[in-house]
Every structure is written in C-alpha cells, then in structure tokens.
Amino acid sequence: MSKVTLTAIVPLLLLAFISLPNYAKSVTNNEYQAVVDTAYNYFNAAANGDQQLLAKAFDLEFGHVKMITTNKDTGEESIRTLTLQEFAGFFKKATEDTWHGNILSVDIVDDKMAMVKLDFKTSKSHYIDYLVMYKRDNNWRIINKTFVAK
C-alpha cells in the first residue's frame, strides 16, 4: 500500500470511529448509586439511631448479621448470628462519637445482587463490613452483613 493510500484511509477511519454513536455507557450507573445509597443509609441510620432509615437499608424479613465473638472465660472464638431485625435494635439512639465511613468497593451482579465493602471508624473501634444486598421489589436491601472489629 502506498503512502498516499494510507494517508487517505487513516483520517477516514478516525472520522468514522469518532462519528459512531456512543454505546459504551454504563448500564449499572443508577444501580451503582442505589447500592451505595443503601450502604450509607445503613451507616447513617446506625450512627443516628434512625430506625426508619435502618428499615429502609435492611431486609428485616430475611436478613442476618454474623460476627465473631470470643468467650471471655475460654478465649474460644465462635460465630454469632442475629437477624437484622435484632441487630437494628442496638441502634435506638444517636451515637455521641463521630463516625467516619468509606466505601472501599462495590460489586454488582446482574443488577440483582451486590456486595459492598465498607470501612468505618469510631472513636472506639475500626470496622470492616461486607454488606450483601439483593434487589427485591425494585429496592436494594442488605440481606447479610458480616464484619470484623479492631
């Protein structure tokens, strides 16, 4: 191929590429924001003792929380499971501490299931939460929460 042919073809290809409609838009952008909002609803509701906002974030019908507990006498670790309904009951009053929360990652599958890794600190503890969510009835809800505390 001659230089003249390449010189004529390259600009035409670039022009064709630039003028194509943009089909690479994110189809989960709205879902991503809804998932993030649900995670922060939980965080803010717990910090402020807001039971209505917790009910909006948690799937109170089916959800559970799992946590590592240590027997004070034996030092043996076990896993404690509570319903999210029971867990929500721990947050009836606003905290006096300042909490700082940061979402570390979000993974959404088929716009129906999501996992959020949430890092948050209080004056007493540092938590890493994994929040698993399902979208049911067009709303994202936390169905499972597991965490570690330092």
Image (tube, grey):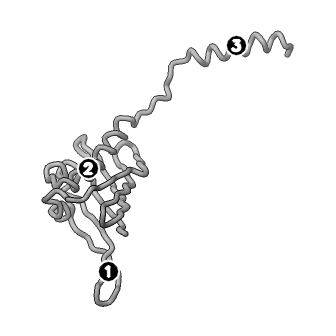
Q: Which mark is residue 70?
A: 1
Residue 49 locus on image (x, y percent):
16, 55
Per the image, label 2 sits on a secondary structure element best described as strand
Instruction: Out of 50 and 114, give the one closest to the viewer.
Output: 50
- Which amino acid does the dot numbered 2 rest on? Arg
Residue depicted at 34% across the width and 35% down the height = 30
* Residue 92 versus residue 11 in the image, above or below: below
Residue 90 locus on image (x, y percent):
17, 64
Residue 69 locus on image (x, y percent):
30, 76
Residue 46 locus on image (x, y percent):
22, 56
Q: Give the side of residue 49 with respect to residue 124, left or right.
A: left
Q: Are marks 2 and 3 in contact (CB under 8 Å)?
A: no
Q: In 3D space, how far apart are the residues under numbered discs 1 and 3 (Cα atoms)? A: 68 Å
Q: In 3D space, how far apart are the residues under numbered discs 2 and 3 (Cα atoms)? A: 50 Å
Q: Which residue is mark 3?
A: 11
- Which amino acid does the dot numbered 1 rest on? Thr
